Structures are given as C-alpha cells and as structure tokens.
Image (cartoon, helix red, strand yellow):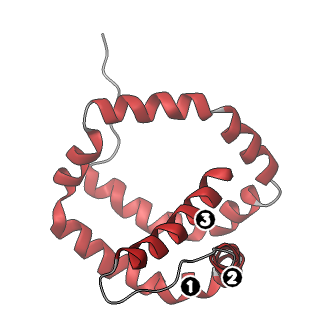
Amino acid sequence: MPKPRVKYTADQAAEKWATVTPARSSYYQENVRGAGSVWEANTVAAEGTWREAITEAANRGAYGKGVKKAGGAKWEERTLTVGVPRWSGGIAAAKDVYKSGIARVLDVISRVELPPKGPKNAPQNYERVKRIGDALHRMKTAG
C-alpha cells in the first residue's frame, strides 16, 4: 500500500504557516461576518457530541495528561509572549460584555437579605457570605 507524500518538514511547514497565515486575516474576517447564526445553530446541534467527547476525554484523564505534557514552563512562556501583549486590547474590547455581566451580579447581590453582622468570626458573618453565594449560584444555574 503506498504511503502519502509528505511535502514539507515540520520546520518548513511551520515557517510557511507563520509567513502566509497572518496575511489571511481578511479571509478570516470575510468568512466570519454574517456566519454567527450558522455557528450558533451548528454548535447547539452538536451539544450531545460535545458532551460525549468531554466525558470520554475526562474518563481517560486527557486534561491532566495534556497539562503535564505541556508543562508549566510552556504555559508561562506562552502566557508571557502571547497573553500579556493581548491583555490590554482584550480588556478594552470586552468592556461592554463585562458591564452587562457584572450588572447582573451586582443586581443579585443588592437584593440579598443579610442577617445582622456579628463580631469577628461569628457564625452569622459566614451566613451573610453563604446567602450571597447561594443567590449567585441560583442566578448562574437559572440560565
């Protein structure tokens, strides 16, 4: 049985990818624009497949294995070289989404009825925290 022809070495493929791909952002944008409803429908329809895949991966310990394979040094290096430069722009781009999300959280917290505050380390102080946590959990699980 014939084997497939591999045209590039890993170094050549990586070099071509790093050189050619950045110039393709207009194609990326063009194919994303107007495709949100299709993405949504297909993603919702795939929920069962996602659940099966996640369960299978969890059952074989894939998450932990992947973390160990990458290692802490890779995480740190990629965070510093990719994450940090994107941080400010990402925060700025997410401002309105954050505002919408935090508004819901603050509204829920503002409606929690708290017991009177007690002296330091008093049980009712922990009850205050529990009531806020319970209210936020109900908000999250309500959808």
Q: Which numbered disc covers residue 24?
A: 3
- Which residue bears the numbered disc 2? 99
Three-letter amino acid code at disc 3? Arg
Whether residue 126 is situated above or below residue 6 in the rendered picture: below
Q: Residues within 10 Å of mark 3 (few under 14, many from 20)?
A: few
Which residue is outermost to the top?
1
**Residue 107 position (above or below residue 35):** below
Looking at the image, is mark 1 or mark 2 earlier in the sequence?
1
Q: Which residue is mark 1?
A: 91
Question: Residue at left 72%, top 46%?
Answer: 39
Q: For this view, does 87 lie left or right of residue 48?
A: left
| Left or right, 76 with reference to 41 | left
Q: Is residue 120 above or below residue 81?
A: below
Q: Is residue 125 left or right of residue 79?
A: right
Instruction: Say which of marks 2 and 3 sits in front.
Output: 2
The percent coordinates of residue 11 (x first, y second) are 26, 57
Residue 122: x %, y % from top left:
33, 80
Q: Nearer the viewer, mark 1 or mark 2?
A: 2
| Amino acid found under the numbered disc labelled 1 | Ile
Q: Residue at 76%, 40% (x, y): give it.
A: 41
Residue at mark 3 to residue at mark 1: CA–CA distance: 25 Å
Instruction: Of the two numbered discs 2 and 3 on the same chain, state the one appearing first in sequence.
Output: 3
At numbered mark 3, what does the secondary structure look like: helix, strand or loop?
helix
Q: SS at mark 2? A: helix
Looking at the image, which residue is at 40% across and 31% down?
A: 55
- Cβ–Cβ under 8 Å for marks 3 and 1: no
Between discs 3 and 1, the one toward the N terminus: 3
Secondary structure state at the residue bearing disc 1: helix
Q: Mark 1 touching mark 2, by CB under 8 A?
A: no
Instruction: Point out residue 36 in the picture as x, y percentages from the top left corner.
Output: 77, 54
* Quadrant of the snapshot with the N terminus: top left
